[in-house]
Amino acid sequence: MTNANGRGRLIYGCMGLGGPWDGTSYGAGEIDQAAAVVEAAQGIGIELFDHADIYRSGKSEAVFGEVLARSQGLREKIQLQTKCGIRLGERGLQTHYDLSREAILERVNGSLKRLQTDYVDVLLLHRPDPLMEPREVADAVGQLMAEGKVRQLGVSNMSGAQIAFLQDQLETPIVANQLEMSLLHRDWLESTVLVNHAEGAGYSFPHGTLEHCMAGGIELQAYGSLAQGRYTGAPAAELSPAESAAAEMLEKLAGEKDTTPESVLLGWLMKHPAGISPVIGTTNPGRIKACSDAASVAATMTRAQWYGLWVTARGNNIP
Protein backbone atom coordinates (compact mmCIF):
# COMPACT_ATOMS: atom_id res chain seq x y z
CA MET A 1 0.00 0.00 0.00
CA THR A 2 1.54 3.28 -1.14
CA ASN A 3 0.71 6.96 -0.78
CA ALA A 4 0.19 9.54 -3.52
CA ASN A 5 3.96 9.97 -3.85
CA GLY A 6 4.39 6.30 -4.70
CA ARG A 7 6.27 5.31 -1.53
CA GLY A 8 5.21 3.06 1.32
CA ARG A 9 2.79 4.63 3.77
CA LEU A 10 4.82 4.02 6.96
CA ILE A 11 7.14 6.85 8.05
CA TYR A 12 9.93 6.65 10.61
CA GLY A 13 9.94 9.49 13.14
CA CYS A 14 13.48 10.31 14.34
CA MET A 15 12.54 12.18 17.54
CA GLY A 16 14.03 9.44 19.75
CA LEU A 17 17.50 9.50 18.19
CA GLY A 18 20.49 11.47 19.48
CA GLY A 19 20.48 10.92 23.23
CA PRO A 20 19.07 13.29 25.91
CA TRP A 21 17.17 16.47 25.08
CA ASP A 22 19.75 18.60 26.92
CA GLY A 23 22.85 20.15 25.42
CA THR A 24 25.15 17.19 26.07
CA SER A 25 26.99 15.88 23.02
CA TYR A 26 26.25 12.59 21.32
CA GLY A 27 28.73 9.78 20.87
CA ALA A 28 29.37 6.56 18.97
CA GLY A 29 26.56 4.79 20.83
CA GLU A 30 23.95 7.23 19.58
CA ILE A 31 25.26 6.98 16.01
CA ASP A 32 25.19 3.17 16.14
CA GLN A 33 21.63 3.30 17.48
CA ALA A 34 20.57 5.53 14.59
CA ALA A 35 22.23 3.20 12.08
CA ALA A 36 20.42 0.19 13.54
CA VAL A 37 17.10 2.04 13.41
CA VAL A 38 17.59 3.06 9.78
CA GLU A 39 18.44 -0.51 8.83
CA ALA A 40 15.37 -1.87 10.64
CA ALA A 41 13.10 0.74 9.08
CA GLN A 42 14.41 0.06 5.58
CA GLY A 43 13.91 -3.63 6.27
CA ILE A 44 10.14 -3.15 6.44
CA GLY A 45 10.01 -0.86 3.43
CA ILE A 46 10.16 2.57 5.10
CA GLU A 47 11.58 5.24 2.81
CA LEU A 48 10.68 8.54 4.51
CA PHE A 49 12.50 9.62 7.68
CA ASP A 50 10.90 12.45 9.63
CA HIS A 51 12.97 15.03 11.57
CA ALA A 52 12.61 18.46 13.16
CA ASP A 53 15.28 21.03 13.93
CA ILE A 54 14.41 20.91 17.65
CA TYR A 55 14.44 17.13 18.17
CA ARG A 56 16.96 16.32 20.91
CA SER A 57 18.28 19.87 20.59
CA GLY A 58 19.35 19.19 17.01
CA LYS A 59 21.10 15.93 17.83
CA SER A 60 18.51 13.75 16.08
CA GLU A 61 19.44 15.36 12.78
CA ALA A 62 23.15 15.32 13.64
CA VAL A 63 23.39 11.60 14.39
CA PHE A 64 21.33 10.83 11.28
CA GLY A 65 23.77 12.94 9.30
CA GLU A 66 26.62 10.85 10.68
CA VAL A 67 24.85 7.71 9.47
CA LEU A 68 24.40 9.22 6.00
CA ALA A 69 28.06 10.23 5.89
CA ARG A 70 29.30 6.71 6.62
CA SER A 71 26.73 4.87 4.47
CA GLN A 72 27.57 5.40 0.82
CA GLY A 73 24.48 5.57 -1.39
CA LEU A 74 22.01 5.71 1.49
CA ARG A 75 20.84 9.26 0.77
CA GLU A 76 19.70 8.24 -2.71
CA LYS A 77 17.63 5.36 -1.29
CA ILE A 78 15.60 7.37 1.24
CA GLN A 79 13.60 10.55 1.58
CA LEU A 80 14.21 13.11 4.33
CA GLN A 81 11.63 15.37 5.91
CA THR A 82 12.31 18.00 8.55
CA LYS A 83 10.39 20.75 10.31
CA CYS A 84 10.99 24.31 11.45
CA GLY A 85 8.96 26.92 13.28
CA ILE A 86 9.40 26.13 16.99
CA ARG A 87 12.01 27.87 19.14
CA LEU A 88 12.90 26.36 22.51
CA GLY A 89 14.69 28.26 25.27
CA GLU A 90 15.46 31.31 23.16
CA ARG A 91 14.99 35.05 23.68
CA GLY A 92 14.01 34.58 27.31
CA LEU A 93 11.07 32.31 26.43
CA GLN A 94 10.66 28.62 27.15
CA THR A 95 8.80 28.08 23.85
CA HIS A 96 7.59 30.27 21.03
CA TYR A 97 6.85 29.96 17.32
CA ASP A 98 8.66 31.65 14.47
CA LEU A 99 7.75 31.31 10.79
CA SER A 100 9.38 34.56 9.72
CA ARG A 101 11.34 34.55 6.49
CA GLU A 102 14.67 34.86 8.30
CA ALA A 103 13.87 32.05 10.72
CA ILE A 104 12.80 29.61 8.01
CA LEU A 105 15.98 30.22 6.02
CA GLU A 106 18.19 30.02 9.11
CA ARG A 107 16.62 26.83 10.44
CA VAL A 108 16.56 24.96 7.15
CA ASN A 109 20.21 25.74 6.49
CA GLY A 110 21.03 24.52 10.00
CA SER A 111 19.13 21.29 9.42
CA LEU A 112 20.92 20.66 6.13
CA LYS A 113 24.28 21.13 7.82
CA ARG A 114 23.42 18.70 10.63
CA LEU A 115 21.94 16.14 8.23
CA GLN A 116 25.00 16.46 5.97
CA THR A 117 22.86 16.70 2.86
CA ASP A 118 22.20 19.30 0.18
CA TYR A 119 18.41 19.07 0.31
CA VAL A 120 15.38 17.73 2.12
CA ASP A 121 12.55 16.13 0.19
CA VAL A 122 9.87 17.74 2.35
CA LEU A 123 9.92 20.73 4.71
CA LEU A 124 7.08 20.93 7.24
CA LEU A 125 6.09 24.12 9.06
CA HIS A 126 6.00 22.70 12.57
CA ARG A 127 3.33 24.79 14.32
CA PRO A 128 1.03 27.68 13.41
CA ASP A 129 2.68 31.00 14.22
CA PRO A 130 0.12 33.73 15.12
CA LEU A 131 2.56 36.34 13.76
CA MET A 132 3.06 34.51 10.47
CA GLU A 133 2.94 36.60 7.30
CA PRO A 134 2.03 34.19 4.46
CA ARG A 135 3.96 36.23 1.91
CA GLU A 136 7.12 35.90 4.03
CA VAL A 137 6.65 32.13 4.15
CA ALA A 138 6.10 32.03 0.40
CA ASP A 139 9.23 34.09 -0.19
CA ALA A 140 11.41 31.90 2.04
CA VAL A 141 10.06 28.65 0.62
CA GLY A 142 10.42 29.95 -2.93
CA GLN A 143 14.06 30.83 -2.29
CA LEU A 144 14.83 27.45 -0.73
CA MET A 145 13.20 25.63 -3.64
CA ALA A 146 15.02 27.76 -6.20
CA GLU A 147 18.30 26.90 -4.44
CA GLY A 148 17.42 23.19 -4.55
CA LYS A 149 17.39 22.88 -0.77
CA VAL A 150 13.71 21.95 -0.39
CA ARG A 151 11.67 19.93 -2.87
CA GLN A 152 8.17 19.94 -1.34
CA LEU A 153 6.33 21.80 1.41
CA GLY A 154 4.00 20.55 4.11
CA VAL A 155 2.67 21.62 7.49
CA SER A 156 2.15 20.13 10.93
CA ASN A 157 -0.59 20.72 13.49
CA MET A 158 -2.64 22.96 11.18
CA SER A 159 -6.38 23.07 10.52
CA GLY A 160 -7.94 22.94 7.10
CA ALA A 161 -8.70 26.66 7.28
CA GLN A 162 -5.11 27.53 8.18
CA ILE A 163 -3.82 25.41 5.31
CA ALA A 164 -6.18 27.09 2.84
CA PHE A 165 -5.16 30.54 4.09
CA LEU A 166 -1.48 29.75 3.66
CA GLN A 167 -1.91 27.95 0.35
CA ASP A 168 -3.50 31.04 -1.17
CA GLN A 169 -0.12 32.80 -1.03
CA LEU A 170 2.08 29.89 -2.08
CA GLU A 171 3.22 28.94 -5.55
CA THR A 172 3.91 25.35 -4.47
CA PRO A 173 1.24 22.94 -3.19
CA ILE A 174 1.11 21.89 0.45
CA VAL A 175 1.59 18.12 0.24
CA ALA A 176 1.29 16.93 3.85
CA ASN A 177 -0.22 17.74 7.24
CA GLN A 178 1.20 15.94 10.29
CA LEU A 179 -1.20 15.56 13.22
CA GLU A 180 -1.49 13.43 16.35
CA MET A 181 -3.76 10.55 15.36
CA SER A 182 -4.10 7.14 16.97
CA LEU A 183 -6.56 4.74 18.58
CA LEU A 184 -5.76 6.49 21.89
CA HIS A 185 -5.96 10.08 20.62
CA ARG A 186 -9.19 9.97 18.64
CA ASP A 187 -10.33 13.61 18.43
CA TRP A 188 -9.60 13.51 14.67
CA LEU A 189 -12.16 10.72 14.34
CA GLU A 190 -14.79 11.45 16.96
CA SER A 191 -15.17 15.11 16.07
CA THR A 192 -16.43 14.01 12.66
CA VAL A 193 -19.46 12.22 14.12
CA LEU A 194 -20.23 14.72 16.87
CA VAL A 195 -20.96 17.75 14.71
CA ASN A 196 -24.58 17.85 15.87
CA HIS A 197 -24.03 16.65 19.44
CA ALA A 198 -23.30 18.59 22.61
CA GLU A 199 -20.47 16.16 23.39
CA GLY A 200 -18.65 17.50 20.34
CA ALA A 201 -17.90 20.75 22.15
CA GLY A 202 -15.33 18.86 24.21
CA TYR A 203 -13.17 18.03 21.19
CA SER A 204 -10.52 20.44 20.02
CA PHE A 205 -9.93 18.91 16.60
CA PRO A 206 -11.10 21.44 14.00
CA HIS A 207 -14.02 20.28 11.88
CA GLY A 208 -13.29 19.91 8.19
CA THR A 209 -9.55 19.36 8.47
CA LEU A 210 -9.62 15.72 7.37
CA GLU A 211 -12.03 16.55 4.58
CA HIS A 212 -9.91 19.50 3.40
CA CYS A 213 -6.80 17.33 3.23
CA MET A 214 -8.61 14.47 1.51
CA ALA A 215 -10.17 16.76 -1.09
CA GLY A 216 -6.86 18.48 -1.81
CA GLY A 217 -4.69 15.36 -1.98
CA ILE A 218 -2.78 16.41 1.14
CA GLU A 219 -1.16 13.45 2.88
CA LEU A 220 -2.22 13.01 6.50
CA GLN A 221 0.76 11.90 8.59
CA ALA A 222 -0.10 10.53 12.03
CA TYR A 223 2.43 11.09 14.79
CA GLY A 224 1.96 9.16 18.04
CA SER A 225 0.41 6.38 15.94
CA LEU A 226 1.59 3.60 18.27
CA ALA A 227 0.15 5.49 21.26
CA GLN A 228 3.51 5.28 23.06
CA GLY A 229 3.00 1.54 23.52
CA ARG A 230 -0.18 2.03 25.53
CA TYR A 231 -1.90 -0.94 23.91
CA THR A 232 1.17 -2.98 23.00
CA GLY A 233 3.35 -3.37 26.04
CA ALA A 234 2.29 -1.07 28.86
CA PRO A 235 1.81 -2.84 32.23
CA ALA A 236 -1.80 -3.93 32.69
CA ALA A 237 -1.98 -2.12 36.04
CA GLU A 238 -1.42 1.21 34.26
CA LEU A 239 -4.29 0.76 31.81
CA SER A 240 -7.86 1.94 32.13
CA PRO A 241 -10.58 -0.70 31.63
CA ALA A 242 -11.18 0.55 28.08
CA GLU A 243 -7.45 0.52 27.26
CA SER A 244 -7.10 -2.98 28.67
CA ALA A 245 -10.04 -4.21 26.61
CA ALA A 246 -8.62 -2.61 23.46
CA ALA A 247 -5.22 -4.21 24.10
CA GLU A 248 -6.90 -7.61 24.45
CA MET A 249 -8.82 -7.08 21.21
CA LEU A 250 -5.61 -6.14 19.39
CA GLU A 251 -4.00 -9.36 20.62
CA LYS A 252 -7.03 -11.36 19.46
CA LEU A 253 -7.06 -9.77 16.00
CA ALA A 254 -3.29 -10.21 15.69
CA GLY A 255 -3.71 -13.92 16.36
CA GLU A 256 -6.49 -14.21 13.79
CA LYS A 257 -4.42 -12.39 11.17
CA ASP A 258 -1.12 -14.11 12.09
CA THR A 259 0.61 -10.83 12.77
CA THR A 260 1.46 -8.47 15.66
CA PRO A 261 -0.68 -6.08 17.71
CA GLU A 262 1.48 -3.21 16.41
CA SER A 263 0.56 -4.04 12.82
CA VAL A 264 -3.13 -4.24 13.72
CA LEU A 265 -2.96 -0.91 15.56
CA LEU A 266 -1.40 0.82 12.55
CA GLY A 267 -3.61 -1.05 10.09
CA TRP A 268 -6.65 0.34 11.91
CA LEU A 269 -5.40 3.87 11.19
CA MET A 270 -4.53 3.06 7.59
CA LYS A 271 -7.98 1.58 6.95
CA HIS A 272 -9.50 5.06 7.12
CA PRO A 273 -10.23 6.44 3.61
CA ALA A 274 -8.12 9.53 4.34
CA GLY A 275 -5.07 7.44 3.45
CA ILE A 276 -3.32 8.10 6.76
CA SER A 277 0.45 7.52 6.88
CA PRO A 278 1.52 6.45 10.40
CA VAL A 279 4.74 7.89 11.83
CA ILE A 280 6.42 5.34 14.09
CA GLY A 281 8.97 6.60 16.59
CA THR A 282 10.17 3.58 18.54
CA THR A 283 13.95 3.10 18.64
CA ASN A 284 13.57 -0.65 19.23
CA PRO A 285 14.42 -2.50 15.98
CA GLY A 286 12.25 -5.44 17.02
CA ARG A 287 9.26 -3.21 17.52
CA ILE A 288 9.90 -1.53 14.17
CA LYS A 289 9.82 -4.95 12.53
CA ALA A 290 6.55 -5.67 14.35
CA CYS A 291 4.92 -2.93 12.24
CA SER A 292 5.72 -4.62 8.93
CA ASP A 293 2.24 -6.04 8.23
CA ALA A 294 0.30 -2.81 8.79
CA ALA A 295 -0.63 -2.31 5.13
CA SER A 296 -1.85 -5.87 4.67
CA VAL A 297 -3.89 -5.61 7.88
CA ALA A 298 -5.51 -2.41 6.57
CA ALA A 299 -6.40 -4.17 3.33
CA THR A 300 -8.07 -7.11 5.07
CA MET A 301 -9.65 -5.46 8.13
CA THR A 302 -13.44 -5.63 8.01
CA ARG A 303 -15.79 -2.81 8.86
CA ALA A 304 -16.91 -4.77 11.93
CA GLN A 305 -13.31 -5.19 13.13
CA TRP A 306 -12.54 -1.50 12.54
CA TYR A 307 -15.62 -0.32 14.42
CA GLY A 308 -15.06 -2.96 17.08
CA LEU A 309 -11.65 -1.52 17.95
CA TRP A 310 -12.98 2.03 18.01
CA VAL A 311 -15.97 1.19 20.20
CA THR A 312 -13.84 -0.90 22.55
CA ALA A 313 -11.27 1.88 22.94
CA ARG A 314 -14.13 4.21 23.88
CA GLY A 315 -15.34 1.86 26.60
CA ASN A 316 -18.06 0.20 24.51
CA ASN A 317 -19.76 3.51 23.92
CA ILE A 318 -20.00 4.82 20.36
CA PRO A 319 -20.73 8.56 20.03
Image (cartoon, rainbow, N blue to C red):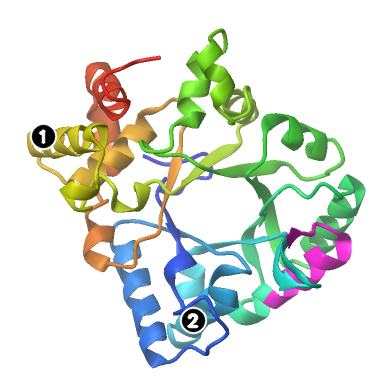
224 or 37: which is nearer to us?
224
Q: Is residue 134 left or right of residue 116?
A: right
Region rendered in magenta:
96-110
* Residue that carries the numbered disc 2 in the rendered image: 63
- Amino acid type at mark 2: Val
User: What secondary structure is the magenta-colored segment mainly?
Assistant: helix
Indicate yes or no whether the magenta region holds residue 198.
Answer: no
Which quadrant of the figure has residue 166? Answer: top right
Q: Residue at left 29%, top 30%?
A: 313
Q: Is residue 215 above or below residue 131?
A: above
Residue 253 image position (x, y, % from top left): 14, 33
Q: Residue at left 48%, top 88%?
A: 26
25 or 78: which is nearer to us?
25
Q: Is residue 28 above or below residue 194?
A: below
Q: Is residue 49 left or right of residue 162?
A: left
Does residue 118 show up? no
Q: Which mark is residue 252?
A: 1
Residue 12 image position (x, y, % from top left): 42, 59
Residue 191 image position (x, y, % from top left): 52, 22
Q: Residue at left 44%, top 80%?
A: 19
216 or 57: which is nearer to us?
57
Mark 1 or 2, nearer chain start: 2
SS at badge 1 = helix
- Amino acid type at mark 1: Lys
